[in-house]
């Protein structure tokens, strides 16, 4: 499966990607996770990206496109890939098309996980992640239910930054819904349900 996950921040792309990885072992390429790892390691990329991330703004296209293009060269993506959080702009979508056509690995689907903005604000401000394994939980999880690790709140999950991320999504990323609809690749799923129920629909939509 060669897929792109579309949807606002907090729609559940990471959760659905984790379920797909667990069941099908397809490589998960999350630009947000790659950038957070770079920030943690203190690399030049991390230092560049952090200011944008903390403000809820997009990291410049050339930086992100370079990162994903390089990642797609890894042979593990020959068996498929799940792109999560990329593309986020029209320029990124066009660059992705060009790279995939070069690699002769066209997209099978662009899966939109659709959730109302106010539901997202509530979800993201109460979201917590595991420092050890990246498990996505909530403020109700005192420790990670998967590995017992310490849970933390992402720097960009405060309400002001969340609202800015949603504005950025509306302006820069939501036009991609029409872009992929035009390519006949768009599949939309109601993401405001239990993750396992959403996952059943994801599998159906992808003919898995
Ligand atoms: P995410 O974990 O996908 O919500 O991404 C967290 C932050 O990383 C975003 O708010 C952006 O600052 C940055 N980011 C992740 N993916 C991209 C992308 N494709 N283009 C630009 N910035 C990105």
Image: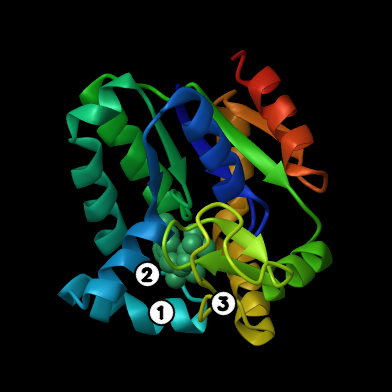
Q: Is residue 92 above or below residue 51?
A: above
Q: CA distance from mark 1 to mark 3?
A: 17 Å
The residue carrying mark 2 has its beta carbon less than 8 Å from ligand 1: yes
Q: Is residue 173 above or below residue 183?
A: below
* Residue 178: mark: none
Label 2: which secondary element: loop
Q: CA distance from mark 2 to mark 1?
A: 6 Å
- Sequence-first tag of 1 and 3: 1
* Residue 57 visible, this orientation: yes
Report which residue position mark 2 lands on. 59
The residue under the point 35% across, 80% down is 50
- Sequence-first tag of 2 and 1: 1
The residue under the point 25% across, 81% down is 47
The residue under the point 27% across, 22% down is 78
The residue carrying mark 1 has its beta carbon less than 8 Å from ligand 1: yes
Nearest the eye: 102 or 27: 27
Q: Mark 1 Cα within 10 Å, few/some/many (few <14, many 20+)?
A: few
* Residue 9 visible, this orientation: no
Report which residue position mark 3 lands on. 153
Give the image quarter of residue 8. bottom right
Nearest the eye: 138 or 85: 138
Report which residue position mark 1 lands on. 52
Where residue 207 sits: x, y (%)?
62, 13
Q: Is residue 98 above or below residue 69?
A: above
The residue under the point 62% across, 53% down is 174
User: Dividing the image into 4 quarters, which one contains the C terminus?
Assistant: top right
Label 3: which secondary element: loop
Q: CA distance from mark 2 to mark 3?
A: 21 Å
Give the image quarter of residue 136. bottom right
């Amino acid at each position: 499966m060669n897929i792109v996950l579309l949807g606002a921040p907090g729609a559940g792309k990471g959760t659905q990607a984790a379920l797909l990885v667990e069941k099908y072992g397809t490589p998960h390429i999350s630009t947000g996770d790659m950038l957070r790892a770079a920030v943690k390691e203190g690399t030049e990329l991390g230092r560049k990206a952090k200011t944008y991330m903390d403000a809820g703004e997009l990291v410049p296209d050339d930086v992100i496109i370079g990162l994903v293009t390089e990642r797609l060269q890894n042979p593990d993506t020959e068996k498929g890939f799940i792109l999560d959080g990329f593309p986020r702009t029209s320029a990124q979508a066009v660059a992705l098309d060009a790279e995939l056509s070069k690699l002769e690995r066209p997209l099978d689907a662009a899966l939109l996980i659709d959730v109302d903005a106010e539901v997202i604000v509530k979800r993201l401000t109460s979201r917590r992640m595991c420092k050890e394994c990246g498990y996505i939980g909530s403020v109700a999880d005192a420790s990670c239910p998967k590995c017992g690790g310490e849970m933390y709140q992402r720097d960009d999950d405060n309400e002001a930054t969340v609202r800015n991320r949603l504005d950025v999504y509306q302006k820069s990323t939501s036009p991609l819904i029409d872009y992929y609809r035009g390519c006949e690749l768009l599949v939309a799923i109601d993401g405001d349900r239990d993750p396992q129920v959403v996952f059943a629909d994801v599998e159906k939509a992808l003919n898995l």
